[in-house]
Image: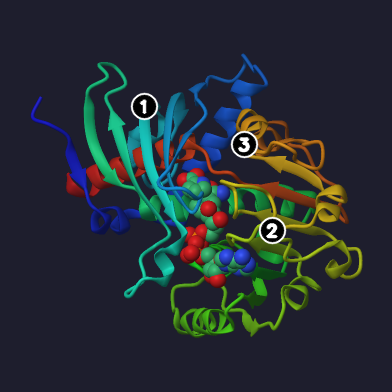
Amino acid sequence: MSGPIYYGAELVRRVLTWQLVNDAVEEALKAVAAQSRNAPQLPYVVSQPMRSVTIAGTERSQLLFTMPAYVGNYRLTAAGAAGDAGNATRSTLACKLVTSFRGNQELQPPLPSIAANILLFNAGTGEIDAIMSGTDITTWRTAAASVVATKYLYFGRFNAAISELPIKVAIIGCGTQGEIHAVAMCSNFKVEQLLLYNRTATRAQQLADKLRKMTNLQHTPEIIVCNSARDAVRDANVICVATFSREPLFNACDLGSKRGLHINAVGAGEVAFGEVATDVYQQSEVFVDSLANAEHELKGFPVCIAGEVGNVINKDYKPEPTSMTLFQSMGMASEDACVAEAVRSALLTIDS
Ligand SMILES: NC(=O)C1=CN([C@@H]2O[C@H](COP(=O)(O)OP(=O)(O)OC[C@H]3O[C@@H](n4cnc5c(N)ncnc54)[C@H](O)[C@@H]3O)[C@@H](O)[C@H]2O)C=CC1
Ligand SMILES: O=C([O-])C1=[NH+]CCC1
């Protein structure tokens, strides 16, 4: 063996599309749920041990996570698996190394708070095949998990086609995740209004300006920069919250009149679930990406968890049209493994 191939960020970016990432993430969510519910009729074999967290210093503001996963017998159906490869089952052994240094945004020039690399192993021999830049994969796959959760938990409750139902989306926190969630929502759904809020208002304004200039969004919504999280969430159908806040940024009475509502709670995952008030959790049906991870990482979580998103997909569960659902996203190594495999597959396709 000549040593691992390195796939840098530029190469990875060449093949990242929503179809590729959404499909790989959906497959990972289904595989994890099948494994945890012991569904022998489904082919998947998953091993996803708890991620380790190394604190780099005296506070939890600088962290290194190791995120290993084996996902066996899954399929890549999107562009990543061109031609016949789309029908073949895959098995991937991978480990992501990811840092979360939340002060990086204050540096001059700023650096991403989250930076990652993914090691891909030969699942038959255990030898390392490739090292892939994982920062964009982390960014995209996290938004894709919210897209998949929104597709099944919000749109899945209505009979209309996704492309026909207009929605208002609130983005709370306009950093890397806020931006990719805005792009993901406008690329996958018919967003008629995008309501942006950030603690530092200029950041929300900068994101609004950037989004208005983007020509590749499937839907170009009206974009409103809000003065408070409360203003942003009041009329939204879908809320994405992605900050480092440990304090609730909105509570149940901020959500306005009863209507169909879905929340993707993405941030603060490594320390808590503090961004959203307890009464919002209490009034929601709460789903996670992995129950096993939730047991370990969400100690003191205020409500019972209804289940895993993958189980909603596997079992075709439909929430009531006016219910409030919440996806507590922690991020899973299986998502990284399946997306990295799809990226490698797509790169091999364009090279050949
Ligand atoms: N669930 C998952 O799979 C993943 C979750 N994350 C989490 O998403 C969150 C955001 O990550 P990035 O967008 O990469 O970070 P970022 O540093 O790019 O953006 C963070 C945003 O949150 C805002 N913010 C920070 N502290 C705040 C506070 N106390 N109150 C209100 N707003 C505050 C900042 O103004 C900034 O706009 C983090 O908590 C991170 O750990 C990140 C990657 C994956
Ligand atoms: O899943 C992930 O990669 C992360 N979750 C929180 C910080 C990074």
- Which image quarter: residue 88? top left
Q: Amino acid at mark 3?
A: Glu
- Disc 2 to disc 3, C-alpha distance: 15 Å
Residue at image position (10%, 24%) is 1
Q: Earlier in the sequence, mark 1 or mark 2?
A: 1
Which residue lies under the disc numbered 1? 93
* CB of mark 3 near ligand 2 (< 8 Å): no
Q: Amino acid at mark 1?
A: Leu
Q: Is residue 131 left or right of residue 230?
A: left
Q: Name, please, the residue furthest toward the top.
A: 40
- Disc 1 to disc 2, C-alpha distance: 33 Å
Give the percent coordinates (x, y) of residue 130.
23, 36
Q: Is residue 105 above or below residue 160?
A: below
* CB of mark 2 near ligand 1 (< 8 Å): yes
Residue at image position (29%, 58%) is 14
- Which image quarter: residue 337? top left
Residue 275: mark in rendering: 2
Q: Earlier in the sequence, mark 1 or mark 3?
A: 1
